[in-house]
Image (cartoon, rainbow, N blue to C red):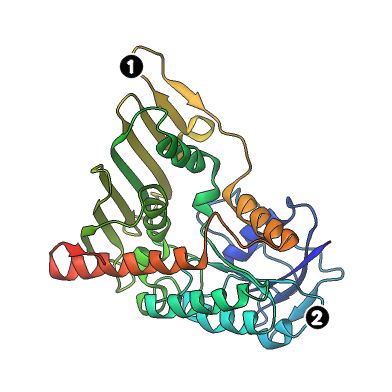
Amino acid sequence: MTINVGIVGTGFMAVAHLKAYAQVPGVRVAALCNPSGRNLDGDFSNVAGNVGDGAAFRLDMTGVKAYRDPAALFADPEIHLVDITTPTKTHEALAVAALAAGKHVLVEKPVAGTSAEARRVAAAAAEAAKRGIFLMPAMCLRFWPEWAWVKQAIADGRHGKVLSARFRRVAQPPAWGHGHFLDGATSGGALLDLHIHDVDFVRYCFGAPRSVFASGHTKVSGAIDHVLAVYQVEGGATVSAEGSWAMSDGFGFNMAYTVNFERATADYDIARGADALKLFVPGQPAEVLRPPGGDGYVGELAHMAECIRTGRAPSVVTAADGAEAVALCEAEAASIRSGKIVVLA
């Protein structure tokens, strides 16, 4: 079965997904949709972002339909999967409508702009799953090989229990998105758009935190553009995550983590390129690890395609996971405003 995909939204994340779909067998991009008409000719050479190879991209539009009305795309009987890469404020309405039309849905993070909206999406996804229709949030970090490796190392205890873990994702203000990102009222600022990756990964590795204490500030969006959060997690490890759009121009983008186990330290820094992940074990030379697998975008899209083919709901990340990540971001925002620890239900 060839899975026909219709992508709604034609910005940077659409390009990231288009490049990844080209590496997933049995999946075909069959339609693009953007109400503004932007990039519907398949020419994405003017689109850039903070990750990826940066190469200009042009999609061969032979046999690819172009829509300006999402409803028309949802009504297309040839489309199996709708991939939503639009601004956050549109996610809930588009995802719910696509599910109602009987389409599988991949929706970019955050799954919605508020936890209430995100939980409505999750509820619609749960109902759709009863009909064999699936929704998955595009939380690509869970599929990134070096991050999947540390998740497994934490889970199987190969280096002992975790004593501390620090996650970091910091960047200069995003210069793409036609101003959407820098309007914190709609994007949620760095807290909701960027930091949510690590918020979700903390939950993935350590379960739902018991409490969170965060500090942060705005800089460019009017929302929280720099956050440092400390979580109380099961098992007592000291776990923190930092996210930022507050770095000065020229800084670029960096993501990193350090996990201290009882018998080893795992350290990842994307700035080291092919040597990004290193393992330090007492009495041994530092070891560069290169876990197998493609990038996280390829991994998440391949997982979604496999779920559609087999009729099994997504298991690596669920709609409920997407909603709970938004809720935890909101708890961090509440902690920043109050200056107090927020106890989580």
Residue 304 in the image: above or below residue 330? above
Dot 1 crowding, Cα within 10 Å, few <14, some 14–19, many 20+ = few
Kindly identify which residue carries mark 2.
77
In x, y percent, where is residue 133?
66, 73
Under mark 2, the amino acid is Pro
Under circle 1, the secondary element is loop
In x, y percent, where is residue 235?
27, 43
Residue 69 in the image: above or below residue 26? below
Q: Nearer the viewer, residue 145 or 160?
A: 160
Q: Nearer the viewer, residue 261 or 197?
A: 261
Under circle 2, the secondary element is loop
Residue 165 in the image: above or below residue 330? above
At horizontal 68% and vertical 81% (from top left) the residue drawn is 37
Kindly identify which residue carries mark 1.
282
Pointer 2 or 1: first along the chain: 2
Quarter holding residue 331: bottom left
- The image quadrant where one finds the N terminus is bottom right
Quarter holding residue 208: bottom left
At horizontal 23% and vertical 43% (from top left) the residue drawn is 236
